[in-house]
Image (cartoon, grey):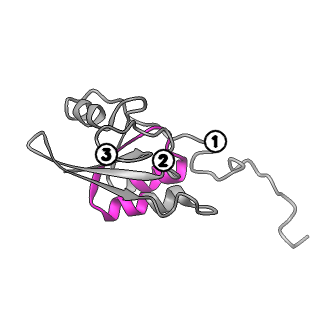
Amino acid sequence: MKIAVATVRGGLDDIVNVQFGRTPTLTIVDVENGEIKNVRVIQNPYASAMGGAGVQISQMIINEGCKVVIGGNIGPNSYEILSMGGVDMRNGSGLTVREAVERYLRGELPPITPSGRGFGRGMRGGRGMGRGKRGWA
């Protein structure tokens, strides 16, 4: 099983980053039979993107074959993409990567809930903002 962890520098001794979409690195941890077998750090190529960083890194995580994401805050669009990709999202804020992965394996990390406003309904929450701008009378 592959676990993606939002990190700043990367590696097992780094702290889990609260940011998700703009986290500088991801630490990818391969786990077999409940043991860490391989650790790889990859740069987040979308960290300085003008927009859509969370969406792009979410797709990258799915393409990497990760089944779990450990981080802090995950925005609504990223949350939706990861959910559709069958990725389990857990909060490991304040822990080292090693501690977070070990706690996940013991079932001790709480699930992440979507952050941001208007989840699933855009910036204005789908409350009819912009009425009268349809271009017809």
The residue lying at 51 percent from left, 52 percent from top is 21
- Labels 1 and 3 touching (C-beta < 8 A): no
The residue lying at 68 percent from left, 47 percent from top is 125
The furthest residue to the bottom: 136
Q: Which residue is mark 2?
A: 20
Q: For residue 66: magenta?
A: yes
Disc 2 crowd rating (10 Å Cα; few below 14, some 14-19, many 20+) is: many
Q: Going by the image, does 74 lie left or right of 11?
A: right
| Place of residue 93 in the rendered image (x, y in percent of width and height, measured from the top left) | 42, 32
Residue range highlighted in magenta? 58-82
The answer to whether residue 25 is above or below residue 70 is below
- What residue type is disc 1 on? Arg
Residue nearest the viewer, comparing 42 with 113: 42
The answer to whether residue 14 is above or below residue 80 is above
Residue nearest the viewer, comparing 71 with 27: 27
| Place of residue 124 in the rendered image (x, y in percent of width and height, measured from the top left) | 72, 49
- The part of the image, by quadrant, that contains residue 108 is top left
User: Between tags 1 and 3, which lies in front?
Assistant: 3
- What residue type is disc 3 on? Gly
Q: CA distance from mark 1 to mark 2?
A: 16 Å
- What residue type is disc 2 on? Phe
Q: CA distance from mark 3 to mark 2?
A: 16 Å
- Labels 1 and 2 touching (C-beta < 8 A): no
Q: Going by the image, does 72 lie left or right of 105?
A: right
| Place of residue 23 in the rendered image (x, y in percent of width and height, measured from the top left) | 48, 49
Q: Secondary structure at mark 1?
A: loop
Tell me, for residue 117, which label it has, or none: 1
| Place of residue 47 in the rendered image (x, y in percent of width and height, measured from the top left) | 53, 57
- The part of the image, by quadrant, that contains residue 62 is bottom left
| Disc with the residue nearer the chain's start (3 vs 2) | 3
Q: Going by the image, does 20 lie left or right of 27?
A: right
